[in-house]
């Protein structure tokens, strides 16, 4: 696949804004027709609520739009990530082979997590993102860093990400809600341009995943939208047309 399917660098919305499509039209409709390019998005939730699935869908959309992407992951190896994508009928192995997607597993053999070195690690990550050719950068997830980094380091990291956004990068960060104090989460959310909250809900006799749109820059009408979905092997994300009562 040495020729991209779309070299436009993003989809243009109704108001002429450049947006990052998820590659799933139903999902895009609920998220302001897609996330704005050159933005910082926080994807927050507990364990097994679909955060990684959503980032995988977004990476698929980025590949289909002709964008380059970097994935920094504490959740997968390169092989397991590509296998998961294929199981969702989102085969990106060709994009990976041609270098349009680069995967950086942060659980590398020989890598030691140390508190006294974490500031340097976070700064190295920022430097890499700054010099990378990737327009879209996904960090899945930041939770592991919180065990070794202070609150000030984490907030400085998000501020530095926001500065990169001002220079053309589109950055998405996932994290587990339990790993942060409430006050810290409020400050992180305020720095970000978009905030998506993931959770599970028991509907009848089964659990479904839910995505709540906390905010998307320049798209107040979508705030509060709730999207329910299931993940089916061989199909991927399937939006469930259900109405949930707000508590």
Image (cartoon, rainbow, N blue to C red):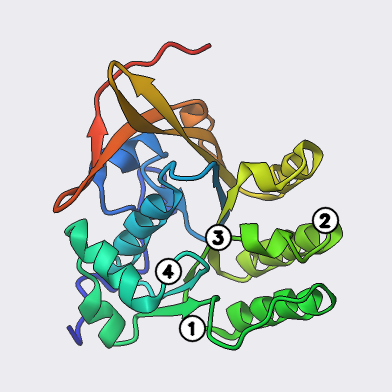
User: Is disc 4 in contact with disc 3, using a CB cutoff of under 8 Å?
Assistant: no
Bin the neighbour count of mark 2 within 10 Å (Cα to Cα): few under 14, some 14-19, many 20 and up.
Answer: few
Write down the quadrant of residue 61 in the picture.
bottom left
C-alpha separation, residue under disc 4 versus residue under disc 3: 10 Å
Residue 166 in the image, given as x and y percentages of width and height: 65, 65
Residue 69 in the image, given as x and y percentages of width and height: 42, 73
User: Helix, strand or loop at disc 2?
Assistant: helix
Bin the neighbour count of mark 1 within 10 Å (Cα to Cα): few under 14, some 14-19, many 20 and up.
Answer: some
- The residue carrying mark 3 is 141
First in sequence: mark 4 vs mark 3: 4
- How many labels sit on residues? 4
Write down the quadrant of residue 65 in the picture.
bottom left
First in sequence: mark 1 vs mark 3: 1
Write down the quadrant of residue 185 in the picture.
top right
- The residue carrying mark 2 is 151
**Is there any visible trace of residue 14 in the rendered image?**
yes
- Residue occupying image coordinates x 33% and y 43%: 28
User: Helix, strand or loop at disc 4?
Assistant: loop
User: Helix, strand or loop at disc 1?
Assistant: loop
Image side of residue 111 versus residue 237, left or right: right
């Amino acid at each position: 696949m040495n020729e991209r399917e779309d070299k436009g660098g993003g989809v243009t919305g109704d108001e002429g804004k450049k947006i990052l499509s998820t590659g799933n039209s139903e999902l895009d409709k609920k998220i302001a027709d897609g996330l704005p390019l050159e933005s910082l998005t926080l994807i927050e939730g507990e364990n097994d609520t679909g955060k990684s699935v959503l980032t995988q869908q977004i990476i698929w959309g980025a590949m289909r739009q002709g964008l380059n992407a970097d994935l920094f992951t504490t959740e997968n190896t390169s092989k397991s990530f590509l296998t998961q994508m294929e199981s969702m009928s989102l085969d990106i192995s060709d994009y990976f082979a041609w270098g349009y997607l680069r995967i950086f597993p942060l659980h590398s053999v020989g890598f030691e997590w140390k508190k006294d070195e974490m500031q340097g690690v976070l700064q190295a990550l920022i430097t890499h993102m700054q010099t990378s050719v990737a327009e879209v950068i996904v960090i899945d997830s930041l939770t592991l860093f919180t065990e070794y980094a202070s609150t000030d380091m984490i907030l400085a990291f998000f501020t530095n990400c926001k500065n990169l956004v001002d220079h053309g990068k589109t950055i998405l960060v996932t994290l587990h809600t339990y790993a942060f104090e409430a006050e810290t989460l409020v400050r992180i959310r305020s720095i970000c341009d978009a905030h998506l909250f993931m959770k599970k809900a028991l509907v009848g006799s089964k659990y479904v995943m839910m995505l709540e749109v906390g905010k998307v820059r320049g798209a107040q009408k979508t705030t509060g939208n709730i999207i329910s979905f299931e993940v089916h092997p061989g199909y991927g994300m399937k939006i469930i047309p259900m109405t949930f009562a707000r508590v």
